[in-house]
Image (spheres, helix red, strand yellow):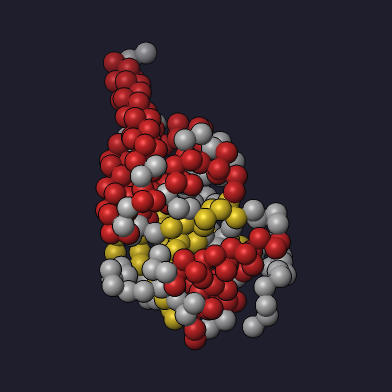
């Protein structure tokens, strides 16, 4: 092994150990997190996420108009490439996320996410969608900000997946401000990369791939918001999908018709 290769290995090990320590620190903080006021929660989440990205040498960039601190009923709707998407959004605009229930079984991450207020949905249960929409409406009306990934899963960043409308019913019911957010990743040479994509890999394999990169960039673009009360959920899904697709210059891949749900029709 050359000296350069050894240096890279030591650097990867150092970053990995630093990340584990940071995760444990976050887990410990998460036990008091629910008992803090919202402003303190946001400050804590933003600081933790920013430190997370620095450990991995991920440069964060964002543009567009972020929701003002005093804006009510804010909903972020983003494309989904990596588990890093959550960290990047938290580092800019702390929110509560809707995530698949499988994450609860992930070591450390599951408990940390639960303590931090993530709303988990069992995607295989059709009646869970209605319940989650009701919960999200109450949280939004109470002052929380919510982020969802309507693709329902991750892509490799070379295209968008069809945006499902079912989880946007609460935006209509709550008259929310729906803010599309376009996410993209670039490597150390500022070229589009799929290394950060969480597709066909385990969480451990994904982390290893990211640790092997000397650095990378993540860019969030906050697009023109939509008013939930002026649209139905399917219109919101198509409009946010189109806005993000246009911003990233990516095609939308549709896999059949959207499944019917037990939500009320428009």
Q: Residue furthest front?
A: 35
Whether residue 33 sits left or right of residue 173 in the image: it is: left
Q: In the rendered image, which quarter contains the N terminus?
A: top left
Which residue is pictured at 45% across the width and 76% down the height? 176
Residue at position x 70%, y 69% in the image: 261
Which residue extends farthest bottom? 230
**Which quadrant of the rendered structure holds the C terminus?**
bottom right
The residue at 52%/55% (across/down) is 119
Q: Position of residue 93 (x, y in %)?
A: 33, 60
In the rendered structure, the answer to whether residue 160 lies left or right of residue 125 reads left
Q: Relative to 45, does residue 148 appear above or below in the rendering?
A: below
Among the 4 quarters of the image, the one containing residue 223: bottom left
Q: Residue at x 57, y 38 (%)?
A: 105
Q: Is residue 195 visible?
A: no
Q: How many marks?
A: 0
| 14 or 47, nearer to the observer | 47
Note whether 178 is above or below 36 in the view shown: below
Residue 105 visible in the displayed image: yes
166 above or below 89? below
* Of 13 and 97, the residue lying toward us: 97
Give x and y (percent) for residue 41. 32, 53
* Residue 163 % position (x, y): 57, 66
Using residue 106 as the reference point, say whether residue 215 is left or right of it. Answer: left
Q: Position of residue 125 (x, y in %)?
A: 70, 57
Which one is in front, 58 or 35?
35
Tell me which corner region of the image, top left, top right, bottom left or bottom right, holds residue 181: bottom left
């Amino acid at each position: 092994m050359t000296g350069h290769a050894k240096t890279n290995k030591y650097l990867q090990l150092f970053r990995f150990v630093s990340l584990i320590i940071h995760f444990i620190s976050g887990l410990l903080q998460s036990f008091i997190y629910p008992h803090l006021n919202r402003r303190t929660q946001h400050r804590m989440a933003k600081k933790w996420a920013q430190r997370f990205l620095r450990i991995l040498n991920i440069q964060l960039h964002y543009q567009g108009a972020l929701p003002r601190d005093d804006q009510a009923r804010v909903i972020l709707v983003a494309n989904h490439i990596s588990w890093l998407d959550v960290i990047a959004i938290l580092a800019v605009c702390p929110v509560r996320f809707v995530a698949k229930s499988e994450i609860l079984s992930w070591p450390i991450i599951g408990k940390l996410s639960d303590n931090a207020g993530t709303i988990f949905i069992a995607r295989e249960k059709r009646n869970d969608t209605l319940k989650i929409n009701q919960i999200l409406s109450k949280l939004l009306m109470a002052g929380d900000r919510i982020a969802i990934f309507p693709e329902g899963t991750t892509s490799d960043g070379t295209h968008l997946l069809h945006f499902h409308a079912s989880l946007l019913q609460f935006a209509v019911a709550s008259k929310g401000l729906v803010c599309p957010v376009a996410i993209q990743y670039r490597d150390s040479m500022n070229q589009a990369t799929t290394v950060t994509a969480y597709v066909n890999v385990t969480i451990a394999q994904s982390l290893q791939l990211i640790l092997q990169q000397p650095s990378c960039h993540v860019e969030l673009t906050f697009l023109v918001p939509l008013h939930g009360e002026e649209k139905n959920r399917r219109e919101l899904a198509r409009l946010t999908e189109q806005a993000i697709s246009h911003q990233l210059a990516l095609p939308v891949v549709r896999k059949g018709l959207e499944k019917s749900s037990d939500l009320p029709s428009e």
